[in-house]
Image (spheres, rainbow, N blue to C red):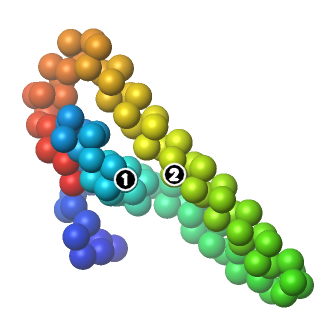
Amino acid sequence: MMEPGEPPGGLDELRLNPGVVEDDELLAATVDAFIEKEAAAAEIQAEAGRLNGDLHDVVDGHFLPIWFRAEELTTARWSELALRLARWAFAEGRRFPICAELDESRGTTGP
């Protein structure tokens, strides 16, 4: 399901260009859109949601906020890593002209 403001289309319509990579918010939105559109990531997210529901049912109310805070920090770490990986991959792609030519032939617009 598409949310308001989400770019239309699939993964093949998401692009990185210098403007996207240099803008923290735009890069984060592009990475989020990639994750939301990527089938394996969606399956993992759905399973994580189910497991969190199960945990809520069996974990004592005192420990649940601790678990959720730990999960929040883990998610923040992976989010930051995803942005750094996207920037690194973009920079590496610019080092190799054949890859850049491929990207240019497909278009280079952000979300």
Q: How would you rate the neighbour count of disc 2 (Cα within 10 Å): few for under 14, some for 14-19, many for 20 or more?
A: some
Instruction: Assign the N terminus to one quadrant of the image.
Output: bottom left
Q: In the image shown, does 38 or 77 lie closer to the viewer?
A: 77
Q: Secondary structure at mark 2?
A: helix
Q: Which mark is residue 97?
A: none
Point out which mark residue 79 bears: 2
Type of amino acid at the residue the image marks with label 1: Ala
Looking at the image, tell me whether mark 2 or mark 1 is earlier in sequence order: 1
Q: Secondary structure at mark 1?
A: helix
Is residue 13 among what the camera can see?
A: no
Is residue 82 visible in the rendered structure shown here? yes
Q: CB under 8 Å between callouts 2 and 1?
A: yes
Q: Which amino acid does the dot numbered 2 rest on?
A: Ser
Decide which of 27, 39 is in the foreground and name it. 27
| The C terminus - image quarter | bottom left
Where residue 31 sits: x, y (%)? 38, 50
> Viewed as shown, does residue 73 lie left or right of 17?
right
Residue 14 percent location from the top left of the image = 24, 47
Q: How many marks?
A: 2
Q: Residue at x 19, y 48 (%)?
A: 110
Q: Which residue is mark 1?
A: 28
Give percent across and percent down for residue 44: 59, 59
**Residue 81 horizontal side relative to residue 5, left or right:** right
Say which residue appears at 49% left-offset and 61% top-offset.
42
Residue in view at x 21 percent, y 35 percent = 18
- Image coords of residue 62 (percent x, y): 87, 84
Please tell me whether residue 2 is drawn above or below residue 109 in the rendered image.
below
Drawn side of residue 25 relative to residue 70, left or right: left
Residue 53 occupies quadrant? bottom right
- The quadrant where residue 67 appears: bottom right
In percent of the image, x 21 and y 61: which residue is there? 7
